[in-house]
Image (cartoon, coloured by chain):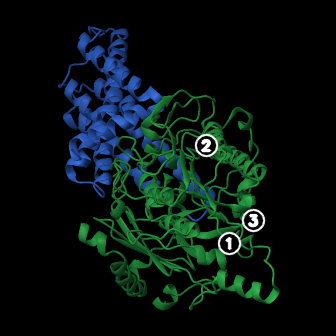
Chain colours: A green, B blue
Amino acid sequence: MDPQRLLAPARGSGAVPGRPIRFGAALLAALLLFGGSPGQARPPDRPPNILFILSDNQRWDFLGCAGHPFVATPHLDRLAREGVRFANAFVTTSLCSPSRASFLTGQYAHTHGVRDNLTPWNNENLTFLELLKQAGYDTAFIGKWHMPGRLPELRGLDLFVTFTAQKGQGRYFNCPLVVNGRETPAAKPYLTEELTDHALRFLGQTRERPFCLVLSHKAVHHPWQPPPDLADLYRHERPPFPRGFNPLVFLTRGNLFEGMIGLPARLYRDYARVVTAMDREIGRVLERLDQLGIADRTVVIFASDNGFFWGEHRLAGTGRWPYEESIRIPFLVRAPGIVANPGRRAEQMILNIDLAPSVLEMAGVPVPKSMEGRSFLPILEAADAPGRQAWLYEYFRDFPFGVPRTRAVRTEGAVYIEFEGRRGSEFYDLRVDPRQQENLIRTREGRRVADELKRVLETLDPQAARAE
Amino acid sequence: MAGRIEGTGHSGVWHRFLLPLFLSLGVMIASRAAYAASSRIDSQTLCQAAAVISGLIEFASVVLAALFVYPVCYFRGATLAERGAAGSASVTLWLGLDSYRMSAAFTLPESLYYGLNLALILFSWNLALMAVLELACRFAEKKKGAPVRVLPPLPLLLLPLLFFIGVIYLLSREGGTFTFYLLQDGYIALFRP
């Protein structure tokens, strides 16, 4: 077992050392050579519109384009076809509130301070929305906020539509909203549709400036309640539960707090139905962009805030744990004029903290040093752009879920995990054991490699180490 | 049996109290271990079967143990305290084990907070079950001609039942989320002031 191999980029990942060819330089060369604009040239001068759609608890493989055996997501598949699907996108903390804060701030949880679902949002945090507003964007946040504490008066927002029912989780049906601080009864029965209506109204406004819209769905969070017309969808499909699955797993060893009570197959199908219902609403948004004639200057990004267990490792529900099903998320980017070779799958590792710097770079806004993510714009522009070799995963306890405080280093080929307390450490070679069934920490060779990765972890995690 | 005299007779403390108690604990511990071990079975079918069977037995051994243990203790002459203890043993042990599971992530006070709240829920059910079983056992004994009063002292019967109904009401509010957030709010108030 070679530590360097586990740290090195995977073969065929598209990650090669050296500077990527900048799309701008290529464009200039093309202009000089051919005297005309290539079909993918970015419209000059005007920063792109940005639409970021965030789903909740959606597993990376619950997309048609990711190979799910039956879930239909034609509109998300369209984004993949017309853009890039990041096959190795992850969250730095697999939990709703910290991950959402990381998307907005470009920072790790130990920096922005929302360490769990109980720690309030610090309104001193700088979001990409605020910076885009300063740069002349119209901005809106529509949907699930779910950061503990009172609803903030977010700086830099022209429109803030959210909900506070059920501690910010909302309800799929008849969910009252809070529109710019004012409580408003539900105008439509189904929340995903109503949030989309708000988004369409925002998109349809006559404007001179570019816009940035964050559309944050309650879907696909528990309890999965699809709209009535999709209630029987997938009724004949057999859920692909993992090897070792048993029907009691959702009720045992603390999994009960995820609230997954019912027949597992029914729960799985309901989850899938809610995914399709959300995809349908995303289709309405994409259609509106087409109708308005702004699709070619709107960057659309789709991601989820964390992964989900369907019985793997005898775990259920929201991620938390540092295993692949939990930390890996769907991540699609359609960026006309920016993406080279649309329809490709990018293997480079990106993180939720990369969204903010990427969006700012696309908008031509300087990225503050306080942001800890890296722009993935180079990867959009060139398939062979280098990616990350290793990154830090961290988790801070969240009552009443019995997951210990965790830090881990994930490379392209391995993951080394340290749990606080008696659980100890784990090390998995993902190339031969992608389902993480064999903890190699107990083997001599595994221990040797893990020690190398531990050194990498220490270099990645100086902040958390000081904060302990 | 003409009558059952509590705490006396040929049923010594082992027969009337300790044996049923250890049996219920034994079934719970064995089924719990079997559930954990089932994950190592290669065959998917056997793994599922083993997990479901052992899991259901573990569930029954915690939630329904009193259904078997309490009447056995009763008709063997166990005192009220003895049969109450035997009927609650597996619930108590299970709570201890689950609190220990939490202690892998949380401090002792936090784990105790967790365990005590869970105890309120589980014991509300267990006490209500034992109250009904007391009634049933007395009725059965009276039918055999024993000079026993069927109705136990009312507080012994009503308090557990009312408490259980109250817990069910709380748990049923908003699909269980009301209680969940109550648990979290209590945690924040105690440990994150």
User: Do the dots labelled 2 and 3 sit on one chain?
Assistant: yes
Q: Is residue A134 above or below residue A13?
A: above
The kind of secondary structure element at disc 3 is helix
Q: Which subunit holds the residue at mark 3? A: A
- Tell which of A283 and B85 is nearer to you: A283
Amino acid type at circle 3 is Glu
Does residue B91 show up? no
Q: Secondary structure at mark 1?
A: loop
Residue holding disc 1 = A338
The image quadrant that residue A45 belongs to is bottom right
Residue A267 is marked as 2
The picture places residue A338, in percent across and down from the top left corner, at 68, 72
The answer to which quarter of the image holds residue A67 is bottom right
Circle 3 sits on which residue?
A82
Front-most of A267 and A7?
A: A7
- Residue type at mark 2: give it: Leu
Residue for point 68% across, 69% down: A84
Disc 2 or 3, which lies upstream in sequence?
3
Q: Nearer the viewer, residue A342 or B162?
A: A342
Q: Quadrant of the C terminus of chain A?
A: bottom left
Residue B95 spot, x, y in % from top left: 30, 43
